[in-house]
Amino acid sequence: MTEIILKAEHLKKVFVSGKKSMTAVDDVSFELNRGECLGIVGESGSGKSTIAKMLTHLEPVTDGQIFLKGKDITRLRGKSLRKTYQDIQMVFQNPAGSFDPRRTLGDGIGESLRNRGMKKADIAIRVKELLEQCGLEEELAKRYPHEVSGGQCQRAAIARALAVEPKVLICDEATSSLDVTIQKQIMELLEELKDTHGLSFIFICHNLALVQSFCDKVLVLYDGKVVESGKPDDIINEPKEAYTKKLVDAVFE
């Protein structure tokens, strides 16, 4: 039986500034099963990253509900929120910017383990394991974010996300700032993690070719609304909306 790990119902986000308001996400719903990858595609400003921020409580939800393993987590606060959000981790577009530049990568990866009360010696062992899982040498733990390449830094960011053994990994344009060769290596790593850890992914991207190779299903966002959804091959081969065709043509022509 398929297990729904994450579910969003009628998500809405309205930003208010003075007397003006802007609806960034409008009535977005989806289900994510265990071990599945959902792609969310659209141009800049379509609402992709706002959805990610709502799912991870970086932005409050204006309306709608989010369920994790059947539990409504939309309005959680404090300790219960922290405990729940070990199950949802996020990897950002700019890996170096997501690490504290004054601390080593090993410190950054081990931070969540320290917060859970793990002993220093055990943290060092776990950080080494996580680096190895993500294709990095142990000595990188001693380096600072500015001392490694973009690809290495993104691998370290993925290692940090895996430290708390999440059920869902949200990748928000996680490969878009990397060159094509490194991008391919990171995608291979994510594919491996999907297989070995049974992770579920939300893969936010503007590149439909990457979504086609990695995702089981896809939402196409335009102006905060879902204009099309289905299997990547179906959407790429037979787009129903002119906007979707434009996204397809940008990659495949």
Image: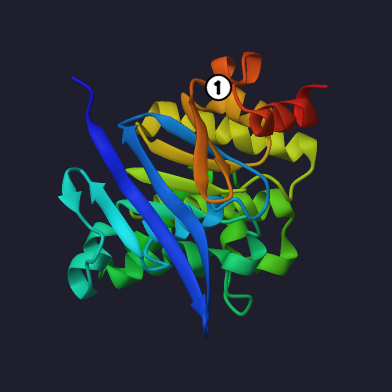
Q: Which of 214 and 188 lies nearest the eye of the viewer?
A: 214
Q: Residue sitting at 59 percent across and 22 percent down?
A: 240
Which quadrant of the view contains residue 179? top right
Q: Is residue 242 visible?
A: yes
Q: Position of residue 48 (x, y in %)?
A: 54, 50
- Label 1: element kind: helix
Q: Residue sitting at 56 percent across and 35 percent down?
A: 189
Of all residues, the one furthest to the bottom in this rendering is 18
The quadrant of the image that shows the N terminus is top left
Q: Is residue 46 left or right of residue 7?
A: right
Q: Amino acid under label 1?
A: Pro
Which quadrant of the view contains residue 22? bottom right
Of all residues, the one furthest to the front in this rendering is 19
**Residue with the mark numbered 1:** 232
Q: Position of residue 126 (x, y in %)?
A: 39, 54
Q: Residue sitting at 55 percent across and 27 percent down?
A: 214
